[in-house]
Image (cartoon, helix red, strand yellow):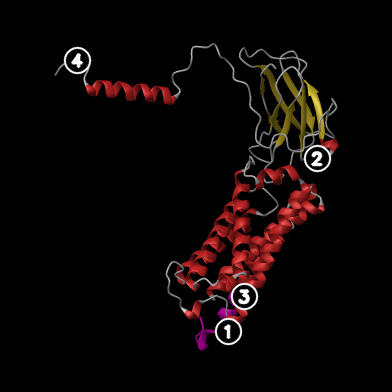
Amino acid sequence: MSTDALTRRTVLAAGVAAAMIGASGLLVPARARGLAPTSSMRGGSNNYLPGAPIVERIGGGGFWMSGTVRRADDGVPIEGQRIQIWAHTTEGRERDPHSHGATLTDATGTFRLEMPQIVPTFGQPHGHLAYDGGDFETVFLRPVMRSAEETSLRADFVLRPV
Amino acid sequence: MNEPGRRRIPQLVIWAALLVAIVAPIAATAFSPQLAWRDPIYIGSGFAGVIAMALLLLQPLLAGGYLPDLSVPQRRRAHRWIGTGLVAAVVLHVGGLWITSPPDVLDALLFRAPTFFSAWGVVAMWAVFGAALLALLLRRLGWRWWAWRLAHTSLAAIIVVGSVVHALLIEGTMETITKVLLCALVLAVTAKVLIDLRVWTTQTRRKTKA
């Protein structure tokens, strides 16, 4: 068996292997990409009301919405970003203004806002969050609770500078 | 089923079971804790969906002639009325949801909703409209009977599968046990009638025309 010749079989095998590596995404371009930005979720912006006020808590509370805001690529936490939150809860529908509120991230990029218990609407217990400040690209999230019994929900933002 | 000797009691049992199968899911929905957090239009559109699912059980039963004491013209007329009711219930269901949250319904209708079940519901909705339209145009179309029946029953199969998947995946006001039982019944009866009528053949058994 020859070991040095470039046979058709080795060329084919190498070609197929190279194609598989490329297609599988194992070959990442050598750019220092780091943390990818979060994309908006389907239906995330439904019943969005721009300019929800910053509040201590939405309604009577009892349920916690929390998460983090970081910058794309380097993952640095971003302080002072306004996150708007709304959902169908025990105290109101998604589109009711009193179901909406906003909060700011702290120095660790964390936000946490108390709100009424989220209840299922349109077939799923879910919340809505929006970042639409001017410094980064707008992102709308729509996290779904694993169970309607849960009393907290989390959503993390990785924002791309404008 | 129709031997004179063993008629009365089985018939009563069939009608009673049917009544339970239809009323139980609707009644159980009325006890959903989620109703407390919804406004009347949203509640109404949820009930319209549950009622449509319950009415869906009657259609294959009527088409297959499985309900006792009904003559062929009677069950044909009933099948048409229930079909009309189904169209109305679907329109009320979608219309009520539209009033409740237009962007969510728009997403569903355009197949871009994040919820997997809404696409199944929308497909079933169009199949309901299609099956009803075929029924309305039965004479005007002038198709061969077997072709019309194959088209109508194909749409019926899409309606049933679409509605069942739609209902099972939703976390809503419908109570889980009655929902699963109703869905299983609708699937089973529909499968039975499609097989009994041999809808894929070009032959017609006059007895079982619906």
Indicate left or right for B30 with A57 as reference: left
> Which residue is tagged 2?
A95
- Lower sequence index among marks 3 and 1: 1
* Disc number lying in front (3 or 4): 4
Q: Quadrant of residue B134?
A: bottom right
Q: CA distance from mark 2 to mark 3?
A: 44 Å
What secondary structure prevails in the magenta region? Answer: helix
Q: CA distance from mark 1 to mark 2?
A: 55 Å
Indicate left or right for B109 with A87 as reference: left
* Disc number lying in front (4 or 1): 4
Amino acid type indicated by mark 2:
Arg
Q: CA distance from mark 3 to mark 1?
A: 11 Å
Q: Nearer the viewer, residue B21 or B128?
A: B128
- The secondary element bearing badge 2 is classed as loop
> Which residue is tagged 4?
A5
- The secondary element bearing badge 3 is classed as helix
Marks 1 and 2 share the same chain: no
Q: Are marks 4 and 1 in contact (CB under 8 Å)?
A: no
Q: Nearer the viewer, residue B27 or B43?
A: B43
Residue A87: % across, % down: 76, 37
> Which residue is tagged 3?
B15
Q: Is residue B162 magenta?
A: no
Q: Is residue A150 visible?
A: yes
Q: Is residue B4 magenta?
A: yes
- Lower sequence index among marks 4 and 2: 4
Residue B103: % across, % down: 73, 42
Q: Are marks 3 and 4 in contact (CB under 8 Å)?
A: no
Q: CA distance from mark 4 to mark 1?
A: 89 Å
> Which residue is tagged 1?
B8
